[in-house]
């Protein structure tokens, strides 16, 4: 089963270059906040019995691709090209099938995703204390 993201180590030996180096911060944020685990658990009901790729990882890969400038499902290819940073990335047909499956569930999948996101946001903002974005009762 293919789940979360690999741990990335930065070296300055000049042997390899990562074209999306800024994405390491996004990947580490996903991991450190527990968003990867929360989304994976939320989407567990949509995981096929013999699935290789975790639906949560696929969805987060799509979000990362959009954050890096992608504008369609096939843009996860930019992540696939950097497996040292993003780990194994699902094929385009696998991504499309997951999106079709989630869309067919009506609002159930969307509610599960929103709930997981909300849980992680609450936990992170609680840890931030007075530095949380909602300290004054409003998110700015």
Image: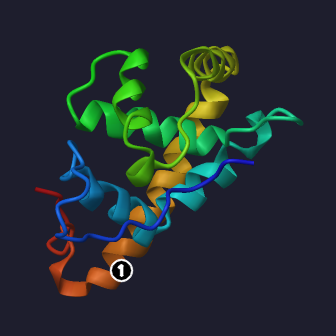
Question: 94 and 129: which one is in front?
Answer: 94
User: Is residue 24 toward the left or the right of residue 106 in the image?
Assistant: left
User: Is residue 108 toward the left or the right of residue 82 in the image?
Assistant: right
User: Is residue 70 toward the left or the right of residue 95 in the image?
Assistant: left
Name the image quarter holding the C terminus.
bottom left
Q: How many marks?
A: 1
Image quarter of residue 118:
bottom left
Query: Where's residue 136, x and y in %?
Result: 14, 72
Q: Which residue, given by chain and number where applicable, does mark 1 sit on?
A: 126
Q: Residue at x 55, y 42 (%)?
A: 88
Query: Where's residue 120, x and y in %?
Result: 46, 64
Query: Where's residue 67, x and y in %?
Result: 25, 37
Against 25, residue 92 (above or below) is: above
Q: Residue at x 55, y 36 (%)?
A: 58
Against 70, residue 120 (above or below) is: below
Question: 43 and 125: which one is in front?
Answer: 43
Image quarter of residue 131:
bottom left
Say few, some or many: other residues with alpha carbon within 10 Å of mark 1 (under 14 / 14 to 19 / 20 or more). Answer: some
Q: Residue at x 89, y 36 (%)?
A: 49
Residue at the outermost right position: 49
Label 1 element class:
helix
Against 40, residue 110 (above or below) is: above
């Amino acid at each position: 089963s293919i789940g979360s993201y690999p741990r990335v180590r930065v070296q300055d030996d000049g042997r390899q270059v990562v074209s999306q180096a800024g994405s390491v911060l996004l990947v580490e944020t996903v991991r450190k906040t527990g968003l990867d685990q929360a989304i994976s658990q939320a989407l567990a009901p949509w995981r096929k019995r013999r699935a290789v790729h975790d639906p949560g990882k696929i969805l987060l890969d799509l979000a990362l691709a959009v954050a890096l400038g992608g504008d369609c499902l096939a843009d996860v290819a930019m992540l696939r090209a950097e497996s040292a940073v993003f780990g194994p990335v699902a094929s385009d047909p696998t991504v499309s099938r997951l999106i079709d499956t989630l869309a067919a569930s009506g609002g159930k999948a969307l509610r599960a995703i929103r709930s997981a996101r909300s849980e992680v946001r609450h936990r992170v903002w609680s840890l931030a204390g007075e530095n949380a974005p909602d300290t004054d009762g409003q998110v700015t």
